[in-house]
């Protein structure tokens, strides 16, 4: 058995969420200002199933959540079928799209593919509660916030790993859960 503190201290959402301290920052989309090319680069350089959408990098205020699959399909469709959509077209997840300068390509509006109310908990939420919420609501991911700012993400697989870890550490807990 490892250090005793592991049993006495309650695991919190902040202990399980990604990114970890040593990881690169969370991959997020901003609600306006990104180009088709920026988003395509993010899709090819990561393998995540989805991306939180924030107001801006500075504010880290959560706006919604977009699945990688829906982003890929929508951008590919727009490139093929929508007039004027090119690498430099700006992507908007906002309700209103400001008029684009006359020399710019038309914008690509993707609010329709965004989940407007992704499930969130604060970083201080106890993990037994988070596990319970995942089970009861059948979540695939949950976003973690602190004072309204987006901090991280926990996926269903992160939850399964966490539950397996606890079971290894404390075999009796299986009997009682
Ligand atoms: P899964 O957990 O099923 O493999 P993902 O591929 O989406 O699902 O996530 C892989 C890992 O990366 C998980 O530990 C998750 O917490 C983390 N993660 C998921 N989405 C993001 C993101 N947009 N930015 C940074 N990390 C993420």
Image (cartoon, rainbow, N blue to C red):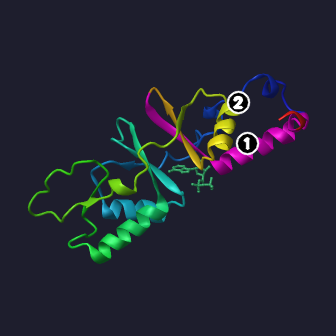
Looking at the rendering, the stretch of residues picked out in magenta corresponds to: 148-174
State the residue position of label 2.
11
- Mark 2 and mark 1 in contact (Cβ < 8 Å)? yes
Q: Where is residue 171 in the image (x, y as percent from the top left)?
A: 90, 38
Quadrant hosting residue 66 = bottom left
Q: Residues within 10 Å of mark 1 (few under 14, many from 20)?
A: some
Quadrant in the picture for the N terminus: top right
User: How far across and down, in percent of the image, does residue 100 sit?
Assistant: 14, 56
Q: Which residue is drawn at 13% across and 54% down?
A: 99
Q: Per the image, is 161 magenta?
A: yes
Inter-mark Cα distance, 1 to 2 = 10 Å
Seen at 28% across and 68% down, the residue is 87
Q: Is mark 2 within 8 Å of ligand 1?
A: no
Residue 78 image position (x, y, % from top left):
31, 70
First of labels 1, 2 by sequence position: 2
Tag 2 secondary structure: loop
Q: Which residue position is annotated with label 1?
A: 162
Disc 2 packing (10 Å; few <14; some 14–19; many ≥20): some
Q: Which residue is drawn at 35% across and 56% down?
A: 112
């Amino acid at each position: 058995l490892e250090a005793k503190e592991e049993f006495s201290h309650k695991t919190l959402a902040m202990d399980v969420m990604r990114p970890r301290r040593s990881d690169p920052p969370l991959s997020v989309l901003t609600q306006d200002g990104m180009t088709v090319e920026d988003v395509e680069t993010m899709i090819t350089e990561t393998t995540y199933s989805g991306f939180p959408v924030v107001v801006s990098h500075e504010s880290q205020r959560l706006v919604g959540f977009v699945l990688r699959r829906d982003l890929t399909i929508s951008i590919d469709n727009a490139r093929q079928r929508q007039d004027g959509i090119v690498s430099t077209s700006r992507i908007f997840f906002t309700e209103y799209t400001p008029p684009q300068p006359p020399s710019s390509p038309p914008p690509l509006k993707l609010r329709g593919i965004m989940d407007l109310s992704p499930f969130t908990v604060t970083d201080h939420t106890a993990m037994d509660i988070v596990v319970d919420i995942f089970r009861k609501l059948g979540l695939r991911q949950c976003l973690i916030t602190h004072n309204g700012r987006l901090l991280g993400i926990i996926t269903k697989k992160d939850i399964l790993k966490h539950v397996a870890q606890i079971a290894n550490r404390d075999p009796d807990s299986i009997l009682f859960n």
